[in-house]
Image (spheres, coloured by chain):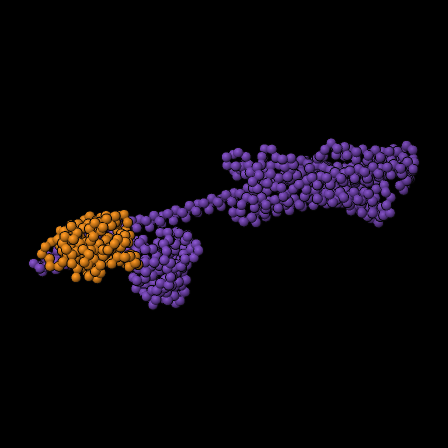
Amino acid sequence: MNRALRAALVAGAAAAAGCLAWAAWPPTSQFAPILASMLVIGLSFMMAGIAAWQRWPSSRLGLLFTIVGYLYLMPYALVNLANPAAFTIGNLSEGIYGAALAQLGLTWPSGRLRSRFECGVVIAEYVSAAGFSLAGMMVWNPTFSGCPAGCPNLLLIHSSRPAWNGLNRASGLVGLVLTGVVLTLIIRHWRSARGWSRRAMVPLVWISCAVGAEQILTGGALNLPLSSLVSASLAPLVLLTGPTLFVVSTVRARTARGAVGAAVVDLEPGAPPARLRDALARALGDSTLQLAFRLPDGAGYLDTSGQVVDPARPAPGRAVTPVTEASGAVLVHDAGLGQEPQLVRLTAAAASMALEHARLQAEVQAQLEQVRASRARLVEAGDAERRRLERDLHDGAQQRLVTLSLALGMARDRAAKADPELGSLIESARKEAREALTELRELARGIHPAVLTETGLTGAIQALVERSPVATTITAVPDRRYPAAIESTAYFVVSEALVNVAKHARADGAQVMIRKFPGRLLVEVSDDGTGGARSEGGSGLRGLADRVASVGGVLRVDSPPGGGTRLEADIPCP
Amino acid sequence: MVRAGPDASGLSRCQTGFVQPSAAILIVYDHDGFRTFARGMLEAAGFTVAEAATGAEATEAARTVRPGLVLLDIQLPDFDGFEVARRLAAQAGGPVVVLTSTREASDYGARISSSPAAGFLPKDQLSGAALRRFLVRDPAGEGRT
């Protein structure tokens, strides 16, 4: 709607309001309350219409609201202008707003009529309103209605009170029938609507029923006992529900917008797409909402419940909104939601954000998984390399040193008899060779303990404990073999812990306990020393924590000053 | 006291001139150089010596040679010394088996004590005297050679 038109409409509304206010003045006059209520009703429709026009520029709803407002207010304003032509036109057009109201109800919420029959019903509404009005004007003398003399009806041909009463009654009956038809149609619309449209129609149905009831009671067709009372007090209130309908639906749309955002924010990270769909459907109040994804091979779309969806040919009453090109996702929703393009855009944006978030999360998760796997592979490769080195030392240098020392022993035995001096020289050479052998053996054990490869944790931990300078007891070690990476990690935990106990703890005793629980191996080394060990900083504990983490485990250090140290490695283990 | 006839194995390379009686020994080492060296050493000590380089050869030689003592390296290319010891123990009138390795006994934890072998001799402590101590301690091979 352009600015000039809006300005004109607002000016017209203001003018009509001004006329009525002038006519009603002073506020103490007997007409003042009625005119004031008319003013409120008419202005509500006009303002709601102008606002609706802005909100749904493509829909006729705004126009209809505005027309209803004008058709309701203008006749009273014209009648009060004290001009014969205006008085006549005003009286002639008095009842036509009802037809516009029926059209509004039948076209809600799209602004369009659904069938030829409905089109006929609306035309019948207008024709009957205009026809009865015109016919009535031909026989109506303004004095019938208590108008002061001097209010000329320019259309009056033959003043006849019985004819006028008859016409009124006939108009009331026809109006009642038409209202019944319109109400029936509206209720049918509501019953056949689904999802968003059905929700959007709920207030309309209630309000239409109220208007219909009001008309039945006050239309004069039935002459019910309370008619005049209801007519005076209830009619304005019922009419006011029209703009209320608009306000309710606007507030609903706003609330839905907020709810869409909140639904996505509340969605926990990594939630599956089906959860996203549920959240959006709840927020929109459209239980029929579908979130569909393009299949990887491009051969169509599947929604989150596994149904095949064809975005190119949505089912009747359904509409398709793409989420993002990149995600290949579409929203299939009730066509009624098309009335709320902003809401649909917002929903698509929210879905896009959530999907992108999920995609990034999956990516990060996958990368993390890769890093974890490669770290584990690195550690395993390192272990294998150490095992190979140990074996090479054993098969090569150690073997030769053994032979050398044995040969020197034999040489010494033979030489000793003939030349004792040569004998002792060879003996010192033999001792050197044995020293070298011992050192090499220690070195090889440090590189990788053969006992671990040979016997697993049982023998390896036993050997560690035997070599430990601090009195150490083994409380438990499972007598079973585990994957090499797990065995060596557990071994290095105990080995490093016992080295630390000997070096720093000033402990009298230590305890080693390895226990198997379902899915994990718990390695625990505790001492009764000075405590105060920390896993941060450049200590061996940091490296040990990394080593434990490489197999997906956790290292915990509990070392209060003066309270001993408890080192616990929790290692995942099949 | 162990008595072993010089011709007991039919592989007699017994050196004369030693007062001590000799027993047939089967040495099982993967490493050719060391095996040759050990053979020389043990023959010098008065033993009749047969050789094997793998676990399969060892079980086969034990059946044909019927040695009084098998000196068995734990690390072998086909199956390890513990397995060979088990197979030898299963043979009727099995020989005294002494496991040996460049590594220390502690590197094998309880595997040595739980094997049917009579004991363990670190490789660098190999000598005729050490082997005789095993034969004295476990006279299973006595009178059978």
Q: Residue at x 55, y 38 (%)?
A: A302
- Looking at the rendering, which quadrant does residue B89 occupy? bottom left
Q: In the rendering, at what x and y percent does residue A253 appear?
A: 65, 44
Residue B3 visible here: yes
Q: In the rendering, at what x and y percent does residue A219 appear?
A: 83, 42
Could you say which chain is coloured orange in the image?
B
Q: In the rendering, at what x and y percent does residue A12 appear?
A: 75, 38
> Which quadrant, please, contains the C terminus of chain B?
bottom left
Q: Tell me: A337 left or right of A124.
A: left
Q: Residue at x 38, y 49 (%)?
A: A376
In the displayed structure, would residue A358 be above or below residue A571?
above
Give the camera-side residue of A125 and A299. A299
In the rendered image of the structure, the colour used to display chain A is purple
Q: In the rendering, at what x and y percent does residue A307 appear?
A: 57, 39
Q: Tell me: B107 left or right of A121.
A: left
Q: Residue at x 34, y 63 (%)?
A: A501
Give the camera-side residue of A74 and A569. A569
- Looking at the rendering, which quadrant does residue B136 occupy? bottom left
In the displayed structure, would residue B112 be above or below residue A471?
above
Give the camera-side residue of A148 and A247. A247
